[in-house]
Amino acid sequence: MDAQTDSELALGNSTDLARRWLGEVPIFVIGLVLVTICLGLLMSHDVFPSFGGVIENARIFAMFTLILVAFDAAWHINRERPESPIEFLKARYSARPLWNTILAGAPLLAVAITLLPFFSKMKAAIPLFKDFTWDETFIAWDRAFFFGYDAWEVLQPVLGYPIVTAFLALLYHLWFLLLYPGVMFFVFCRVDSQLRRQFFLTYMLSWTLIGGAMATMLASVGPCFLEPMLGNPHFADQMAYLNAANEEVPIMTLRVQSLLLEWHGVGKDGLGSGITAMPSMHCAIAFLYWIAVRRIDKRWGAFFAVFFFITWIGSVHLAYHFAVDGLVSLLAVAGIWWASEKIIVGWDRLVERQAALRTKTVPAE
């Protein structure tokens, strides 16, 4: 199947839509299989997912959609200066190519809306499958890498200033934008077909295999939760610094850590809940955006390379993760990205062979 961009779908040809959806079949099939497995595992432990998380996630996507539409409208009105802004916007947002693009991307958007709530359920359910027993191992791994020191101790002379910590905490929260406007970019914007599909398959497999399966097998809570959950004060000095810094400049992540601990205590398993350290999904998704976006634009690729690095060191400095959490995530995403390319290319070749066979078997007129 030849590389195809969303701009080709602007023609509104039903064949174009069918071709795009056919190319995305591996994502839908693998996604359905993974959701079925997750449902089976959860229900085997008397956990019955509801649609509440999906509805909540859909609302967040809708909120970002409204924000982006408002920004788009203001931008184009300011640039075009139309005599009638209302008629201008009516024509812009009722254009057939726009709605064809929305229709073309709807199935992938549905996958994105459904994915995170199931991940949250699985993440919150980790204690049902495995005890948190790996933290001591990851502490030892970090200390082996940093010559007997914890990773945060090595970073502290450079990052250990309240204003720097607060800035890193802000950037750590801005990662959230990758899950909504970032995903919508790959769904609807003009992106090479293979790249779009490879991105989404890697995105989906990262949440399920890295954030689900690997997080369960390597169950750990991370530095900030080590003492309150497991009674181990190994990172007491790091938490003391973060709380002292919070007295000078608000450290946004501390409030989130408190909420996660509170939700864990009451068994909340909704969107955004659950505690796990290894591997780091913040690092995994940031790394995925770097390897995908650099194929679209080198400058934005450089930006996401820096963002990934800041996310990695921020995850350590803010006591969410061990340094090795990010390293394992990086290697896992790289492997999934490679496998996703093989799956997409293999599917395209299969579709091409089937099309060629149909052509050969059609009787001559």
Image (tube, rainbow, N blue to C red):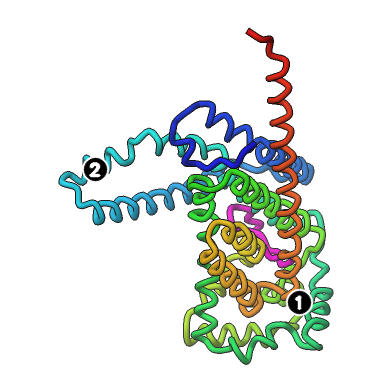
Name the residue rendered at 47%, 41% in the picture: 7
The magenta region covers: 265-280
Query: Which disc, if any, is residue 88?
Result: 2
Label 2 SS: helix
Location of residue 239 by image quarter: bottom right
The residue furthest left is 83
Name the residue rendered at 82%, 69% in the picture: 134
Name the residue rendered at 70%, 50% in the picture: 205
**Disc 1 and disc 2 in contact, CB within 8 angstroms:** no
Residue 92 position, x and y percent, is 31, 41
Q: Quadrant of the C terminus?
A: top right
Residue 236 position, x and y percent, is 69, 84
Q: Please tell me whether mark 1 or mark 2 is closer to you in this view.
A: 2
| Distance (Cα) linking label 1 and label 2 | 62 Å
Name the residue rendered at 67%, 51% in the picture: 202
Residue 121 versus residue 311 in the image, above or below: above
Label 1 SS: loop
The reply, left or right, for residue 175 in relation to residue 287 is left
Location of residue 332 by image quarter: bottom right
The reply, left or right, for residue 263 in relation to residue 71 is right
Q: Looking at the image, which is closer to me, 273 or 6?
A: 6
The kind of residue tagged 1 is: Gly
